[in-house]
Amino acid sequence: MTANRKRLLVAQAITPAGWALLENRPDIEAVRYDSAMPDEAYRALIPGAHGIALYTRQFGPAELARCDNMEVIGRVGVGYDLVDVPGCTEKGILLMVSGTANSVSVAEHALSLMFDLARRSAEFDAMTRKGDWSQRLVAPPLDLWERTLLVVGFGRIGTRIAARCRGLEMKVLVCDPYVDAGLIRAAGCEPVTLAAGLARADFVTVRCPKNAETTGMIGAAQLARLRSGAFVVNTARGGIIEEGALYDALASGHLGGAGLDVFVEEPVPADHPLLSLLNVVVAPHMAGNTVEALDRMSRAAISNCLSVFDGAPVVENVINKEVLG
């Protein structure tokens, strides 16, 4: 038995690729937990733990109150809206994300939703299965070629979406006030404000983090700026686009369609108004969860935790860098 073993809580979602990093670490006591377990059972695991590989569970004030040895929270992914970041910082707990582990996967999913909307994939699938071809030319599908895309958020994923869409010969506008305009231009894109970009866009893809600044950032007034027939894709977080306003813009015929991987409430209720619309393509928050991405995220989450235990945190993956001193 190794003295001073570190106790690491490991989400059930961690794949064998992540567990393999723990095989030759006798200094680590790895404890698997089920992300679907009851809250109290989950919280009961926290006292005495030095780290957690966190998948879909919340880590808020109730969880932080149980922390007595916690050094690091390693997210299996890049979003951290379910984590109390100020609370972690106050307790000296590092919050780390998975870097670019799922960036390509999310970018591909956003692009697939754009194709589905432009090509009316869901509608044509249903039409074909019913044997009713009579309406197929009422609203023909569209090309992406030479269409204008607005990317909201030009980080790890937004840059990859932009690159792929430029490869399709789309015009790419970028709204990100935190990225230097010269870097946006160097990527072959045009920097714009949100208002100016919405007025020109045929497609909008949202890739910014959800926080106090971005929650409800795209509401009725912003959606009204879009061209008639425009399409909206959200693979970031539910609530950045106001769902009620989005429903109204779709139901009225102002927007051509929406592709949504995320919702305010997840799992999304079966009677959610947006699910009643034929011009909405949905997925259960799966954009970043391909086979390959799950392996990459698992390795990243475990590696991040081990880097802290080993005294050499991977700085670029740390969200609250002030904890580093």
Image (tube, rainbow, N blue to C red):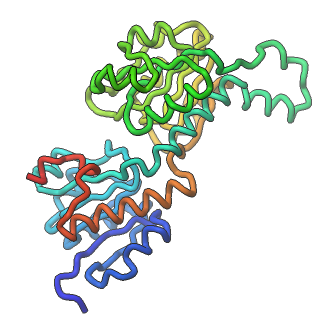
Q: Residue at x 54, y 46 (%)?
A: 286
- Given residues 141 and 163, the one toward you in this image is 163
Residue that protrudes farthest toward the bottom in the picture: 1
Q: Is residue 153 visible?
A: yes
- Given residues 64 and 213, the one toward you in this image is 213
52 over 246 or under it: above or below: below
Of the 4 image quadrants, the one containing the N terminus is: bottom left
178 over 83 or under it: above or below: above
Q: State left or right for residue 279 relative to residue 69.
A: right
Residue that protrudes farthest toward the front in the picture: 186
Q: Position of residue 174 (x, y in %)?
A: 41, 21
Residue that protrudes farthest toward the left in the picture: 325
Q: State left or right for residue 5 relative to residue 268.
A: left
Q: Residue at x 50, y 8 (%)?
A: 200
Q: Residue at x 40, y 65 (%)?
A: 11
277 over 266 or under it: above or below: above
Q: Position of residue 108 (x, y in %)?
A: 57, 39
Q: Residue at x 78, y 16 (%)?
A: 140
- Given residues 238 and 177, the one toward you in this image is 177
Q: Is residue 263 visible?
A: no
- Given residues 234 and 251, the one toward you in this image is 234
Number of numbered discs on residues = 0
Q: Position of residue 92 (x, y in %)?
A: 12, 56
Q: State left or right for residue 57 relative to residue 144.
A: left
Q: Position of residue 215 (x, y in %)?
A: 33, 27
